Every structure is written in C-alpha cells, then in structure tokens.
Image (tube, rainbow, N blue to C red):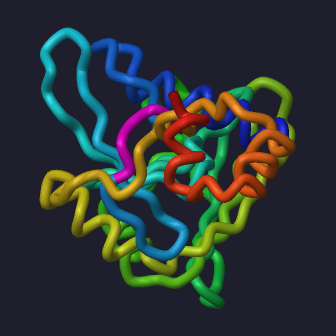
Amino acid sequence: MNPFVRYAGQILALSITAGAGAQNLADAPLIFRSGNWDVHRTSDGMTDTSACVATYGTQYGVMLGENALTIAVPDGVRRVQLRFDNDTALPQRQATRDEVHASRIEIQGADFAEVLRSGRLRYEAVTRNNDATVSGDINLSGAFQAHGNVVAGCAGNPIVMPNPPAPPADNCTPALRQRMADQGIPQANIDKICGA
C-alpha cells in the first residue's frame, strides 16, 4: 500500500474518531456500497450514538460525509486546487484555518455540490511544512448514491461484517478425511466428526 494513503487514512480515521472514542473505520460495519464508495456505521464508545461516513474503498483518508468531502494530507495543507471531470481546474486557493489545523482538504458548499454531480475529482495540495506537492485522482462514480445513504443515516443492515467469524476448526487432516471417505463414511458425517 502507498505510504501516503496509509498515513492519510490514519490521520483522517483519527480525526473522525479522536474526540469521542468512536470505533475505528476499518472495524465499522459496512452498510452500503456504490461504485468505489463504502458507507460505514460507526459507534461512539462513550455515548453509543451512531454516525455514518463513506470512504473511498479502504482509503480511509478520503471520506464523504453529509456536507463535505475530506482528503487527508500529511504535513499540513497550505494551498489547494481542484479539478472536476475534464473542466478547467479551479483557481488555486489558500487552505482554510480548519484545513490547516486538521491536515486535510475540506470540500464544502458549491464545490461539494460539484463533487456529487461529477464523475472525477483531481486535486493538488501544497503542504504547509515542506512545500511539497501532493496530488490525487478520485473516481466519484457512486459518490452520489453513497451520500444519499449517509444522509439517510446509514439505512440498512451491514452487508459485510468487519471481522467475519473464523472458519470452524478442522480437526482432521486431508489424509484422514480421505481414509474415512474410502471407508464409505458419508461426507456430512465426516464434517461432523472433523468439526467437533
């Protein structure tokens, strides 16, 4: 995995969960999937309240909420530039105080409405600490539907368990299973014997 994506995911996962002890997004139930977007239902450990967020697959540094798309940027954010689909790039702008403080790009307002209408987002950020350029390309297909599920409060039951149960232990080696089958023991009985 790209170290930036891993680092960005850690920043953003911490930023959404740090204040109230909410569960880690990687462990949160997956409620809805559309295109590259996964909607997770998180639970606050102190209040048991639920919150919804869509992530760009397993890139937890890119999160779609009710009113914003946020993209984690290591080393802070100084300037931001966005480009939707194949339109002309928007003018570069200074990072907001919140973006600087949270080390992430925050796309809100009219730009957020454009996120929900577009199929592609390219972004570029100049970092605050070392003036490096960080850029990315996000496929927005499915973001509109994922946003609708977030707004609906993560409607639905989990479609994928975050930590599926381990398969039952098999107490028999393949050779033992074969010997039992050769003796005419039915497969269902072998499974019972080996699963005990």
Residue nearest the observer in this picture, 168 or 61: 168
Mark count: 0
Q: Is residue 18 left or right of residue 126?
A: left
Above or below, 27 against 14 in this view is below
Q: Is residue 163 left or right of residue 73?
A: left
Please state the horizontal and vertical placement of residue 159, each as a whole percent of the image.
Answer: 35, 58
Q: Is residue 42 above or below residue 47?
A: below
Quadrant in the rendering for residue 130: top right
Q: Residue at 19%, 9% (x, y): give it.
A: 46
State which quadrant residue 72 falls in: top right
Q: Quadrant of the N terminus?
A: top right
Image position, residue 24 (x, y; %): 45, 26
State the residue in front, 170 or 107: 170
Q: Which residue in the rendered view is the most extreme toward the bottom?
A: 86
Pick the front one: 187 or 25: 187
The image quarter in which residue 4 lies: top right
55 relative position to 21: left or right = right
Relative to 134, residue 92 above or below = below
Q: Is residue 77 visible?
A: no
Q: Is residue 132 magenta?
A: no
Residue at left offset 53%, top offset 84% = 119
Closer-to-camera residue (118/87): 118
Compared across the picture, whether 91 is left or right of 20 comes to right
What residue is drawn where x is 55% and y is 49%?
A: 62
- 23 w.r.t. 181: above or below: above
User: Which residues, given as a range, are shown in magenta?
Assistant: 26-30
Residue found at the far front of this picture: 183
Where residue 192 sits in the image (x, y, percent)? Answer: 50, 40
Query: How far across and how far down the image is residue 185, in percent?
Result: 61, 53
Q: Residue at x 34, y 75 (%)?
A: 144
Res. 95 visible in picture: yes
